[in-house]
Image (cartoon, helix red, strand yellow):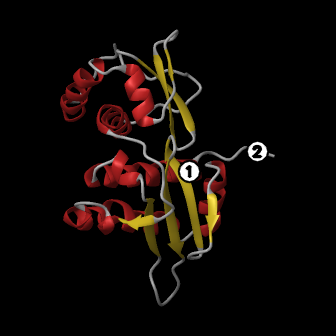
Amino acid sequence: MIKHTNRMFETPYNHYLRIFQSLDPMETSKRCYVPFDPGRSAFYVRLMGTLYEISFPQSDAGDAEAPAMKNNEKILLMRYLCEGRHVPRRGGQLAYDEIPNGALYLSNFRNRCVRRAARCFGGDIKSFERAMAGFHAERLPQGDAGFRFEFVSGIYMSVILWEGDDEFAASAQFLFDDNFPSAFTAEDTAIAGEIAVGRIYDAISLPKEKD
């Protein structure tokens, strides 16, 4: 098992690790709509299009070819496997404050996700579009650039941008498929938005290959 020294990460992670280790893996696989391979004793979970092998009961993420998960990503996936549920989508989308308890965290969500997305991507729509193509995102008709994409195996969110100009600052909106609240609490949905912005930003910032 990997040892971690960051206590802000270690305490919540170890709490959910203990719960994770007591799970019935087949029930978890069905509940979260993620494959479980008994032979390898591992779950297979997609995060922003990258497939991770998460061993059970140790929880270490494998696959050396995949980008390493950040601490908040590890905790969020652990919480999803322990507490979340994948249910069929009814066809609608929700703004953050329409999610149960979302209004309580709305100011925090706007700072961590909405304003950050506008600041990072609103001045370079083309780079944002190229990054979203790498996540196999679905183009939306809203805004100057809007995309719906898979966040975690079968659970989707959308990011919509309006480009800034001399008169108006860039702005952004997040929408979540209506099955998102079954998978994540309002607090975890804010973390999911933060993770999505970080992964998109990292994709834009990757060194470009030389011709």
Q: In this view, does 61 lie above or below 74?
A: above
- Looking at the picture, which amino acid does disc 1 mark? Ser
Tell which of 20 and 69 is nearer to you.
Answer: 20
Tell which of 111 and 103 is nearer to you.
Answer: 103
**Separation (CA) of disc 2 from disc 1:** 15 Å
- Looking at the picture, which amino acid does disc 2 mark? Lys
Farthest residue to the right: give it: 211
The residue labelled by disc 2 is 210
Tell which of 22 and 188 is nearer to you.
Answer: 22
Q: Can residue 149 be seen in this view?
A: yes
User: At 19% across and 27% down in the image, what residue appears?
Assistant: 15
User: At 55% across and 22% down in the image, what residue appears?
Assistant: 64
Tell which of 160 and 208 is nearer to you.
Answer: 160
Total label count?
Answer: 2
User: How far across and how far down the image is residue 78, in percent?
Assistant: 33, 32
Q: Decide: few, some or many residues near mark 2? Use Cα within 10 Å; few <14, some 14-19, many ≥20.
A: few
Q: Can residue 122 be seen in this view?
A: no
